[in-house]
Image: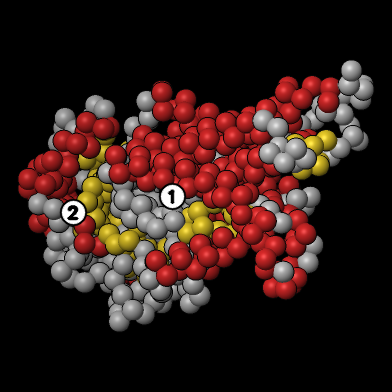
Amino acid sequence: MNLPAILPCCFNRLHCSPSITPPTHFLRFVIRKKGSVVCRLSDNNKDDDSVQDNNSHQDNDQPLENTSLENNDGPQPDQQTGLEDGTDVQVASGSPLPGVKVPQQLNESIRIPKETVEILRNQVFSFDTFFVTSQEPYEGGVLFNGNLRGQAAKTYEKVSKRMQEKLGDDYKLFLLINPEDDKPVAVVVPRMTLQPETTAVPEWFAAGAFGLVTVFTLLLRNVPALQSNLLSVFDNLDLLKDGLPGALITAFLLGVHEVSHHLVATEVGIKLGIPYFVPSWQIGCFGAITRILNVVPNREDLLKVAAAGPLAGFSVGFILLLSGFILPPSDGIGIIVDPSVFHESFLAGGIAKLLLGDVLQEGSPISVNPLVIWAWAGLVINAINSIPAGELDGGRIAFAMWGRKASARLSAFSIGLLGISSLFNDVAFYWLVLIFFLQRGPIAPLSEELTHPQNKYMALGVVVLFLGLLVCLPYPFPFSNQPAL
């Protein structure tokens, strides 16, 4: 099997920059030398020469070094790539283990010895679970090709139990899809090489800094008098208090979204990091970047966690939006808006047309409860995070429902549409930039990626994507020009 080319250092966007940046939730195979990181491009032709398919039992009888799985007839690892011991490289997205960091050279105490490989092949895997037909060294571990017997979830459970009985907790099993032929493969790596992404500064400090800026942008967004001249903010700090009610409503919706993620993650055994709120002067906040700290067991668990936040945010935001249209303004005046603003969202425009009827006329400003605008902002934040792209909630939902290859195509399509939208909308432009540099993926491998989620969870995922679409799509129908009776 031809392993894909290793992506260059520029793909490793968060790890080569000394600036304070929110971390992604990539899981890495990392060995460092005194904290140094060297990024180099691997030569694909040399990689091909050094990786041989073991398609017969004779291959297993060839002498292997007890600290390496490379064929002795091929060049030594340091001769293949010229990388220093401990060098980090980014695994390409066409790899069975995308989105991870692996060391090109492993310490002898970490590499899988030949004896362990034999135990894995002959005692851990079996005819009734995963019948191994060949094996090959792969990115710090061993990749086993073979035939899956029975359901993937049960097979993974059986093989994991056997591996623990034979080898303890020293190794981690992944049951994945080979992107080259769409067939199941099993990958075993030393567990100690799985490390969460590290940051240059403490998480709480970076998250707190982003949070403080987000508080300011939430207040600023709800004071129109200051938005036209940002420099005037420092001369009119007292005006920021006028934006407090709107900032609290939007912050409440953000909190509901993030708390729901964490509650469901705790229930299914997934560890989440501290959320990094992303400030936005257009809508107050773009949401939060939250990394996953451990390996997600399966696609259903990922779907539960990813869908929980948007579902809760949409539900509460929808209730607040309806309340804003139904309840009169507390001051009897409210906010004067032009009906054209409701053309920006199919959901908001449809509800406005349904509840306001003929009062909503093109070119005739109306007074609405400010709760409408505040709730709408919260819905927009949930909607843009539900776009099926990269590592957004929508991207994780798409991956969980349709698998890695289909979700990657959908992600590329969504980013393309977002790029076109960015030509006409500044929110779309900034969101596109953030996705590209911080959230474009790929999603880190799950323990078992073959089993589809249950239909009820698939339905929830579709609902999230559909609601996000309703919020983002414009309302195309004209409002009534007939005078109200």
Per the image, the residue denoted by label 2 is: 171
Could you say which quadrant of the image residue 329 lies in? Answer: top right
Residue extending farthest front: 331
Element type at marker 2? strand
- Across and down, in percent, residue 94 comes to 45, 51
Per the image, the residue denoted by label 1 is: 443
Task: Check disc 2 and give the amino acid type.
Answer: Tyr
Task: Check disc 1 and give the amino acid type.
Answer: Ile
Could you say which quadrant of the image residue 26 lies in? Answer: bottom left
Residue drawn where x is 53% and y is 68% of the image: 10
How many angstroms separate mark 2 from mark 1 (CA)?
21 Å
From the viewer's perspective, is the residue at label 2 or at label 1 nearer? Answer: 1
Is disc 2 in contact with disc 1, using a CB cutoff of under 8 Å? no
Q: Nearer the viewer, residue 444 or 179?
A: 444
Tell me which numbered mark, 2 or 1, is placed earlier along the sequence: 2
Residue drawn where x is 72% and y is 41% of the image: 331
> What count of labels does the image hold?
2
